[in-house]
């Protein structure tokens, strides 16, 4: 039976069929659906959200050493967080097979950078697989488990946004029940102290040599001979793009196992074609190695080094062929950026913050990053998960040292706080900061599409669990000044911000209100109530001052002809922020 | 020469482009085509511009194509048709919903909704305009606008003979099957 699956769904199916027993991840686009789909195999596979990628990988390492087949999945920048355990796990090797999935984002569709994580495979000296469609993604999970156990190494599968989120047909199979291996205490393997690590270090190089032999032999790397004037080496989505353009008119060396490269076979292939192209997205990862091996090829001289590829970019680069397009004046098209939703609790917080002068807003990764847009304009920086807090600390120290009156307000969300904000806040307490640290607790991991986290009371597989109380954590870290507030209450929000800015020690403000899109739990309804009715504007009272428009709520529209504001009732959820902003009391909530 | 057809759907987050493309690709798969479908789930997409590409034929390689390659563009919102008009072949078709959703920059008054946007599209490409919102409302549920548009696409791509009932049954909750079938038929008959 065949099903149309995304590669993320296919990986999950592959995990099930390959007898994986434990999987962990932290959500991150484009990898999130892998664990969400694995979670459905409850009973066969334990699937968990970890607070961050490092913890996810470490728990998976433990599960592998205990003897089970395992998977950790993360987005490309998540692997930076998890790099520490990876590099040493690459030394110790596995017991149960272990697959690490890195989902890269060429084109920066929803990330903060475009790093090419194939470099991690080479850097940490582990084998790498690259699927080009969903069927391969599923099949490669099984290959990965076999390679991992045979060569005693973690295996990386490098995916990209386009592969992760494209659907193609997949043949569905049955689950192979793989017996758990017995746990064996083995200090010479798993205790990476210097003496042991030195011995393991030698084994890693030996393993790489054997893996290169495997790379030359495996069916994952195969040649398709057609006309031999042009030969193309490609992997992942790039292979499909090349196929689209050149069809069966050129020869291909299609690589599924891309580290170590099958250099012997590449050399042979080069000898059999007239001109050899290496088509790869982002870095010249394969090209540099191929050229270093003394093999002639053409790569980044023609193929762009940044951005996502597609068939037409390749056609233009290699054939000088461009599709005819309809031309028109694009300047008249208005931009359509994503915005904070109508009823988003973050809006109340930023509406208040935006009024403040002489502040630097050190923000982080999450929906609240959308506050950079007009009319809120309430954001100065964004680097990586957790950095909002630590950067605020450093910046405030410097402003203070140079006697500048600038205050720093740090902003991150509940899930980001659990991810890596806790240690940043600890730094601020320890080093006597006086920045204002704000945790926007919307009771869910929002931006990636509503995943449970340690604060929500549920696990990935739907079991009720302990709710970690953010205020208690903050106090335990040594913060004396902590207050919680409903950010949609403007007066309270203003008071608390005045209070925070007047302190000369680390202050934590927790804005606590559920994401407007969250499916509320029984406890949520109990704690916060449910939204009822919609807001309505009395047109006679509205003077068209547009103060309510400064909230940036997408349910509000200024009608130029009428010189009045009106409310889109299909979007409004009656959060009542605009009701509080209106100086003429023209807006009120109606209906139940 | 490849027999692959390229369909692009565009709209605004929350308009149901993804469900429409899911029904479309399910039906094409069940009819024996090789199908690839690609979408970008980005940041919180509410209110943002969204696109999906569906490619089908005997054998499909790439899940996406570049500019000037789509056989048909189905735009769930008027201005989005203009945004993605460079995606179609110069002789390609456009189905545009006569439905305007102002973006946040328009709401805030920093940009204007382009005037006569549908007329501009019509002047540039073979265009079918459909008031899917009105049709959906006449069926009692404005949300099935997406399926009305899918119906128009089915007609223009000459796919009426495929088993849409079965595809809809696979993709929507039982209570909504009949409504969606009606919406599809309205869309087919509307163009």
Image (spheres, coloured by chain):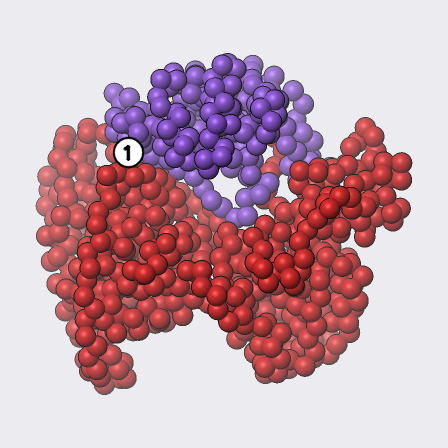
Chain colours: A red, B purple
In this view, A189 is above or below A223: below
- Horizontal placement of A456 versus B63: left or right? right
Residue neighbourhood size for the residue with mark 1, other residues' Cα within 10 Å, grouped as few (<14), some (14–19), many (≥20): many
Q: For mark 1, name the chain.
A: B
Residue plotted at (55% across, 39% down): B13
Left or right, A288 with respect to B65, comes to left
Q: Position of residue A320 (x, y in %)?
A: 34, 29
Task: Give residue B144's position: percent from left, percent from top.
Answer: 54, 29
Residue displayed at 25% across by 74% down: A66
Give the x, y percent position of residue A19. 23, 59
> Residue A553: percent from the left, percent from the top?
70, 45
Foreground: A286 or B82? Answer: B82
Residue B7, quarter of the rendered image: top left
Q: Quadrant of residue A414?
A: bottom right
Whether residue A410 is visible to the viewer of this picture, yes or no, is no
In the rendered image, which residue does mark 1 sit on?
Answer: B61
The residue positioned 35% from the left and 23% from the top of the image is: B163
Nearer the observer, A161 or A137:
A137
The answer to whether one can see residue A138 in this image is yes
SS of the residue under disc 1: loop
Q: Residue at x 69, y 43 (%)?
A: A572
Taking B135 as reference, is A586 left or right? right
């Amino acid at each position: 039976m065949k099903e149309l699956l995304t590669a993320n769904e296919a990986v999950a199916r592959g995990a099930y069929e390959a007898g994986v027993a434990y999987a962990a991840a932290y959500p991150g686009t484009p990898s999130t659906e892998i664990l969400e789909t694995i979670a459905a195999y409850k009973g066969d596979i334990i699937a968990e959200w970890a607070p961050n990628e490092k913890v996810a990988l470490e728990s998976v390492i433990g599960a592998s050493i205990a003897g089970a087949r395992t998977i950790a999945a993360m987005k490309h920048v998540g692997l930076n967080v998890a790099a520490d355990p990876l590099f040493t796990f690459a030394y110790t090797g596995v017991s149960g097979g272990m697959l690490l999935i890195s989902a890269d984002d060429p084109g920066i569709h929803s990330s903060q950078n475009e790093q090419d994580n194939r470099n991690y495979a080479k850097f940490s000296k582990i084998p790498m697989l690259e699927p080009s469609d969903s069927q391969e993604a599923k099949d490669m999970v099984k290959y990965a488990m076999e390679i991992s156990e045979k060569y005693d190494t973690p295996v990386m599968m490098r995916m990209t946004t386009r592969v992760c989120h494209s659907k193609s047909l997949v043949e569905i199979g049955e689950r192979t029940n793989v017996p758990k291996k017995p746990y064996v205490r083995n200090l010479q393997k798993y205790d990476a102290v210097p003496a042991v690590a030195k011995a393991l270090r030698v084994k890693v190089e030996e393993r790489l040599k054997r893996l290169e032999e495997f790379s030359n032999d495996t069916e994952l790397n195969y040649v398709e001979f057609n006309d031999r004037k042009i030969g193309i080496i490609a992997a992942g989505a790039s292979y499909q793009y090349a196929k689209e353009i050149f069809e069966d008119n050129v020869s291909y060396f299609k690589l599924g196992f891309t580290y170590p490269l099958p250099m012997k076979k590449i050399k042979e292939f080069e000898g059999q074609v007239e001109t050899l192209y290496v088509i790869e997205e982002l870095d010249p990862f394969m090209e540099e190695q191929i050229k270093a091996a003394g093999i002639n090829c053409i790569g980044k001289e023609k193929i762009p080094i940044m951005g996502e590829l597609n068939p037409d970019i390749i056609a233009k680069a290699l054939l000088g062929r461009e599709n005819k397009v309809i031309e028109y004046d694009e300047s008249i098209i208005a931009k359509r950026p994503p915005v904070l939703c109508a009823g988003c609790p973050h809006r109340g917080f930023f509406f208040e913050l935006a009024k403040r002068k002489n502040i630097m807003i050190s923000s982080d990764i999450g929906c609240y990053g959308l506050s950079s847009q007009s009319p809120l304009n309430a954001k100065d920086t964004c680097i990586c998960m957790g950095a909002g807090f630590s950067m605020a600390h450093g910046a405030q120290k410097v402003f203070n040292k140079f006697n500048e009156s600038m205050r720093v307000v740090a902003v991150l969300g509940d899930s980001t706080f659990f991810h890596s904000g806790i240690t940043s806040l600890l730094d601020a307490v320890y080093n006597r900061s006086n920045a204002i640290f704000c945790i926007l607790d919307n009771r869910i991991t929002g931006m990636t599409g509503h995943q449970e986290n340690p604060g929500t009371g549920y696990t990935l597989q739907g079991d009720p669990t302990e709710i970690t109380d953010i205020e208690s954590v903050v106090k335990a870290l040594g913060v004396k000044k902590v207050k919680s507030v409903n950010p949609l209450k403007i007066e309270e929000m203003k008071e608390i911000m005045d209070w925070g800015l007047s302190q000369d020690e680390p202050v934590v403000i927790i804005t606590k209100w559920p994401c407007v899109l969250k499916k509320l739990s029984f406890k949520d309804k109990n704690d916060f109530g449910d939204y009822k009715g919609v807001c309505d504007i009395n047109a006679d009272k509205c003077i068209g001052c547009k103060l309510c428009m400064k909230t940036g709520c997408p349910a509000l529209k200024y009608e130029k002809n009428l010189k009045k504001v009106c409310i889109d009732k299909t979007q409004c959820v009656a959060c009542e922020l605009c009701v509080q902003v209106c100086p003429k009391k023209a807006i009120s909530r109606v209906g139940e | 020469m490849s027999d692959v057809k390229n369909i692009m759907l565009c709209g605004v987050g929350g308009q149901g482009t993804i469900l429409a493309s899911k029904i479309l690709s399910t039906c094409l798969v069940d009819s024996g085509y090789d199908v690839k479908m690609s979408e970008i789930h980005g940041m919180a997409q509410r209110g943002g511009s969204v696109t999906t590409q569906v490619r089908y034929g005997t054998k499909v390689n790439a899940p996406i194509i570049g500019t000037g390659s789509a056989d048909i563009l189905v735009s769930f919102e008027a201005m989005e048709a203009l945004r993605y008009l460079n995606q179609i072949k110069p002789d390609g078709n456009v189905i545009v919903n006569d439905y305007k959703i102002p973006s946040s920059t328009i709401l805030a008054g920093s940009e204007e909704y382009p005037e006569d946007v549908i007329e501009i599209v019509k002047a540039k490409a073979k265009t079918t305009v459909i008031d899917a919102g009105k049709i959906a409302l006449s069926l009692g549920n404005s949300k099935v606008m997406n399926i009305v548009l899918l119906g128009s696409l089915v007609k223009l791509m000459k796919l009426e003979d495929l088993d849409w009932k079965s595809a809809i049954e696979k993709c929507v909750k039982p209570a909504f099957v009949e409504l969606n079938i009606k919406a599809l038929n309205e869309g087919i008959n509307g163009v």
